[in-house]
Structure formats: C-alpha cells, structure tokens
Image: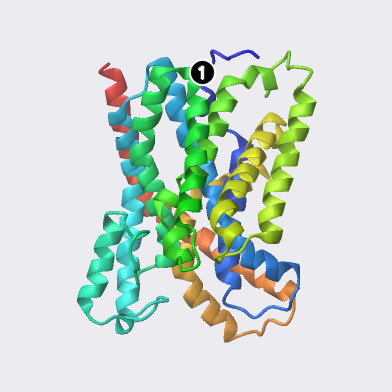
Amino acid sequence: MVETNNRVLFKRHYPELDLVRAVAITIVMFAHFGERFVTPPGFLTKLIAWGWNGVGLFFVLSGFLIGGQILEEARSGEFSLKKFYFKRLLRIFPAYYFSLVVLGLLFFTGLSDGNIADTDSVSVFFKDFFLHLVYLQNYFVSVLQRDLYWSLAVEEQFYILAPLLLVFLAGRSWRLTGLWVAFLIAAGLAVRHLVYGPDIDWMYGVRLPFHTRFDSLLFGVLSAYLFIKYFKFFGAGEDGASKARPLVLALLLAGAVAGIGCIFLYGAHSGGYFNTCWQFTVGGLGFSSLILFLIFARAGRFIYPKKFFSTVAGYSYTMYLYHYILVVPVVKAMKGIVTVSSHAEFIVLFVIYFLIVLAVSAMLNRVVERPFMNYRKKVLSKWTEGR
C-alpha cells in the first residue's frame, strides 16, 4: 500500500461531499417538518422518525473534513492553531450568535416553539441564553432551541479538542495515528456501556453529551486518515489504482448499506441497549463508509444537477440554524390553507418549506456571514504574505 505525498487533498472540492451535506440537511429538515403533521402510515413516516440521524451524518462529515485538514497540514508541518481557531471562529460564531438574537426575540414574543411564559422567570431564559453563548447547552436542560442547537455545542467542543489531539498524534507517529483514533472510537463505545442502565435519561445522558457522541466525529477523522494514507492505493481519480480497488469499493458499499440499514430498521430515538450502546457506533461506521465509497468511486460524475447540491451545501449551516425557527410560522400558515391527507401532498408542502428556508438562508448568508468570511480571507492573506 502506497502513501501519497499529495498534501492538498482537503483543499480540493468534492461534489460527492456537497451531496452528503445536502442530504444531511434535507433529512434533518424533513424530520422537524414531518413531526408537525399527522401523515398516513408508511415509509415516509418511518423516514421522518429516523431523520434525527441526519445529525450523525453531519458529525461524521465534519470529522472527515476538519480532521482531514488538520491531519494533512500537521503531517506536512504547516498546521497553525492560530489560523485554525481564527478560521473556525469567523465561520461559526457570527452566524450562530446572530441566530440566537433572532431566536431570543421570537421567544419573548411567543413566535417560536418556546415562550417565556413556559419558564419560571426571565432569569431562566437568560441562563439558557448564556449556556448557548458558551456552547454548553448539550449538558444542561434548556428551554431555548434545545432540540437543535445542542449539536452545534458538540461540534464546537470537538473543534476545541481535535487540533490539540490530532497534532499531538500526527507529530508522534503518523503510522500509529489511525490506530489511536480507532482506539478512541472504541473508548466512546465503552463510555456508553458505562452509562447504560435502566434509569438513564437517554436524551441528556446519551444523545446530547460530548463524551457519549465524540466517536461519531472520530469516525470521520479515521476516514480522513485512511483517505490520505491510501489515496493512491484506492486510485481516487488517479491512474494505476490497485487491482483490489473494486473489492474495496464493494466492501465500503456493503458497510454503508449494512450500517445505515441497521440503524434505520432497528435504531430509535429512545433508550434500550442497542440504541444506547451501539446505535451511534453502527451509524458512524455506515456514514463513514458511505463517504469513502462516494469519493473513491468518483460518484460526483453522476451527480446532477451539481450546482443545486453545491448551493444547498454552501448554505447548509445557515439552513441548519434557521430551519427550526422558520418551521413554526410556515407550518402554521400551511395548516390554515390545506389538510395533509396523502404522502404526495406532504412532499409538495415540504418542498415549498425547503425552498423558503433556502431563500431565507441565502439572504442571511449574504448579509450576516459573507462580510465576516471576506474579512477572514483578507486577514489570512496578510498572514500568508507576512510569513
């Protein structure tokens, strides 16, 4: 097996990852939209109930992209903690904090899911607001967008710890880095076995905390490590691929189908041994296999229309922030006009909702996020020139 000396794998654009990101946000939106309707029993009902796993797909994808960038730069000696944290800060914080302000205003006016009347006092609201400001909402009961923003806390906690861990591992031994990451994935599985019990609060004891979910992100990191290490062996876009490539692709596809299929059929948003201990491990294996399969199979050749998936992927963070806020007024308006009596009608309404969220996100991205991203670009350019 040949290691590649190519150090820019994670600076390339992969349409396959645009597809994955677009599918992930669509699944999450589908679940949050669907839970507000009574739909006829069938496949769509099961898909709505399963849709919360879209967050798990986001976790694995984030681990793949961020972990891959860190590993690639650390291996070449080009990684900078200063640049990494600066880039993450301007990418995540402005849009997130602006959405919290919007959510707070809606919360006080009763236009969001929650309402200040649901709390004992105004101080409870501001306590929850502070928890969101410092990304600790996944460890405390919150009345403010608990069912969505907890995942951002998990990712932010990962962004803080991942560079320190991965730079340390890659600096000690590149060849052993993958084994250490695999060991930590096993440790995540062990943690869930330790917390498992009949009296566990599944939501706050298993689904939300970082210490029970970090292995989902590490599945993405491990996939990124394999992608870098065996790039030429797999022949992703390269000549001279190994003759074993078809077999490897078949195994990756089998892993993706088995892992995702298993959590679709047997997983659930509730307690129990499988759901507590194994569900996220099996899902992480399936999602990471899917990502590697799509890239190594060069599935981007068959994605159409590429521009649409690229657009949705580009706005996916903004859509994630606002789709749950927008679902309240949109569904209320829809229920005042139509009654859902079939899956086809539900799909049409979801498409309308999706396009509304996409349009609003495009506008907010331009107004809120783009100025900070342009500023980030200028600062990074100056740092590069000053080297």
Asked if 276 appears above or below 9 in the picture, the reply is: below
Name the side, left or right, on which 197 lies relative to 283: left
Neighbor class of circle 1 (other Cα within 10 Å; few <14, some 14-19, many 20+) is: few
Q: Position of residue 283 (x, y in %)?
A: 61, 49
Q: Which residue is mark 1?
A: 175
Asked if 161 appears above or below 109 in the picture, the reply is: above
Residue 34 seen in the figure: yes
Asked if 124 appears above or below 16 in the picture, the reply is: below
Residue at the image point whose x is 74% and y is 17% from the top:
242
User: Of all residues shown, which one is farthest toward the left?
Assistant: 123
Say which quadrant the N terminus sits in.
top right
Residue at the image point whose x is 60% and y is 34% from the top:
14
Residue 161 is drawn in which quadrant? top left
Residue 109 is drawn in which quadrant? bottom left
Residue 42 is drawn in which quadrant? bottom right
Residue at the image point whose x is 37% and y is 31% from the top:
165
Residue at the image point whose x is 30% and y is 29% from the top:
81
Residue nearest the viewer, comparing 149 with 1: 1
Residue 304 seen in the figure: no
Q: Position of residue 62 (x, y in %)?
A: 49, 42
Name the side, left or right, on which 370 lies relative to 51: left
- Which amino acid is tagged 1? Arg
Asked if 249 appears above or below 216 in the picture, the reply is: above
Q: Position of residue 200 (x, y in %)?
A: 45, 65
Q: Secondary structure at mark 1?
A: helix
Name the side, left or right, on which 336 lies relative to 206: right
